[in-house]
Amino acid sequence: MSDQPRITVTLHWRDEDGWQQRQVAFVDQTPQHLIPRLVEALGLSSIDHNGDQIVYELRLGGEQRQALQPRELLSAQNVRIGNDIWLVARMASPDLNHTQRCILHLPDGTEIVIGPRGQVLTRFWLLECLKLLNPDEYRREEERSLQGQSVFMAVTRDSHCTIHLADRGYWVVTTERDDVITEWAVEQEFEQIPVGAPIRLDNGMRLRLGGSGGVEIAVILA
């Protein structure tokens, strides 16, 4: 990535002393990858004085402009050398009436909507959903299980992990187990979820239940 052309822009952000600006240069990437690096480099907080998470957005051409799409390359969103970019902090919305739906996308394409009360993920629950929504794939999965080749075998029979709404209205995943590996994709690589720590789910995040040989589930927030 270091050999790629770099985009030099004027970055604007607000801290305790007011609005600041400086020139920064970075390779073409998505806002969701760039924003954490900018927040860290500028020494900005990710938690406010009430302990609530601060969500940062990148905006092109002005503080009041629409936020750039988090998963699209900056160049695809008309970010060019010499532009002015605003790094804007906003609070995660606590309005539960506008909470995004959490949809789990299984490897075969089956989509499962998680209810507002949350859901404990187990092998039985996932396979029962597959049986209901895609019976043909369920039968194929049964055959793989008999041969010891099913990725679902890496998921525990009891509580593997839980997906639920946090108090502030966003979705999180937690696990209380340290004898199975539940991973989540960060910076396009998988990291293990710490025991007992709620990890916020973002649109497009991937979960892998059972480690490298487990079932990979995409998370869609809509």
Image (cartoon, helix red, strand yellow):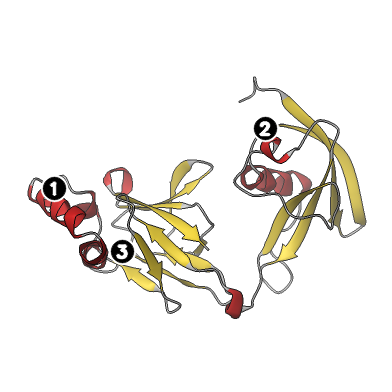
The Cα atoms of the two marked residues, 1 and 2, are separated by 42 Å
Q: Which residue is mark 1?
A: 144
Task: Tell me the element at label 1.
Answer: helix
Judge whether 113 appears above or below 181 on screen: below
Q: Position of residue 85 (x, y in %)?
A: 82, 44
Name the one closer to the observer, 197 or 185: 185
The Cα atoms of the two marked residues, 2 and 3, are separated by 37 Å
- Identified at 40% across, 68% down, the residue is 113
- The 10 Å Cα crowd at callout 3, few under 14, some 14 to 19, many 20 or more, is many
* Most distant residue in the left direction: 146
Which is more N-terminal, label 3 or label 2?
A: 2
Q: Position of residue 46 (x, y in %)?
A: 69, 59
Q: Mark on residue 160?
A: 3
Mark 1 in CB contact with mark 2 (< 8 angstroms) = no
Q: Position of residue 77 (x, y in %)?
A: 70, 41
Judge whether 184 appears above or below 6 on screen: below
- Identified at 20% across, 53% down, the residue is 137
Q: Mark on residue 62?
A: none
Q: Is residue 184 left or right of residue 154?
A: right
Tell which tag, 3 or 1, sits nearer the viewer.
1
- The 10 Å Cα crowd at callout 1, few under 14, some 14 to 19, many 20 or more, is some
Task: Tell me the element at label 2.
Answer: loop
Q: Is residue 46 visible?
A: no
Q: Is residue 210 left or right of residue 93?
A: left
What's the amino acid at mark 1?
Answer: Arg
Q: Which residue is mark 2?
A: 28
- Identified at 63% across, 41% down, the residue is 30
